[in-house]
Amino acid sequence: MQTQIDSAVSVIPVTIGQQMRCYRAFVTTAPVSLDGPATVTLYASTFGDVAGFAADPLPFDGATGIVPARLVLIPTTELDWQRARYQSGQFLLAPTDPVLVGTRTLQQWLWHRLTLPTEFGA
């Protein structure tokens, strides 16, 4: 079953060599351990901080506002699987606002993420 993807969701095409993948941006409260191998965390903070990037308002209070949350890129080819995995743990997966988090912003954040040193000393 293919999930219908709203064309208004933030999207970024990534081309490496001859391969191109399209990624969709989401706000999630899921831990990294539930991510697929191609899911990329662009930004991690508290839910109160990250919730503002969502396409639709995400209500929160003082207790839920401090829950860890992330802005992630998920390949469209893995979206159904990733959504099911997050939902099985009852974690939020909400599309980002394409105006606040447009292609240019996603490109800048992804470039920044790719240039960060890794824990292996790269």
Image (tube, grey):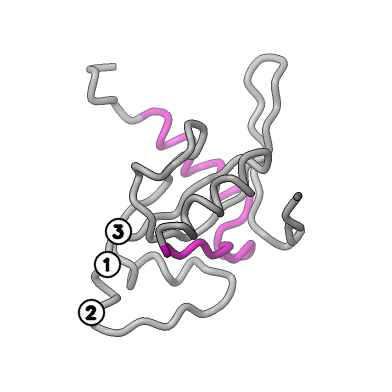
Which residue is at the front of the view, 3 or 12?
Answer: 3
Q: Residue at x 53, y 57 (%)?
A: 26
Earlier sequence position, callout 3 versus callout 2: 3
* Mark 3: few/some/many CA within 10 Å (<14, 14-19, 20+): some
Task: State yes or no: discs 2 and 1 in contact (Cβ < 8 Å).
Answer: yes
Disc 3 residue type (three-letter): Ser
Question: Above or below — where is 15 with respect to 78?
Answer: above
Q: Which mark is residue 86?
A: none
Residue 43 colored magenta? Answer: no
Residue 101 colored magenta? Answer: yes
Q: Is residue 105 left or right of residue 66?
A: right
Toward which corner of the image does residue 68 lie, by quadrant?
Answer: bottom left
Q: Position of residue 63 (x, y in %)?
A: 23, 79
Disc 2 residue type (three-letter): Ala
Q: Residue at x 63, y 62 (%)?
A: 98
| Mark 2 lies on residue | 63
Toward which corner of the image does residue 4 lie, by quadrant?
Answer: bottom right
Disc 1 residue type (three-letter): Val
| Mark 1 lies on residue | 67
Q: Secondary structure at mark 1?
A: loop
Q: Secondary structure at mark 3?
A: strand
Q: Position of residue 62 (x, y in %)?
A: 24, 83
Q: CA distance from mark 3 to mark 1?
A: 9 Å
Task: State yes or no: discs 3 and 2 in contact (Cβ < 8 Å).
Answer: no
| Range of magenta residues | 90-115
| Mark 3 lies on residue | 45
Q: CA distance from mark 2 to mark 1?
A: 7 Å
Q: Is residue 43 left or right of residue 99?
A: left
Q: Is residue 108 left or right of residue 30?
A: right
Q: Residue at x 33, y 50 (%)?
A: 31
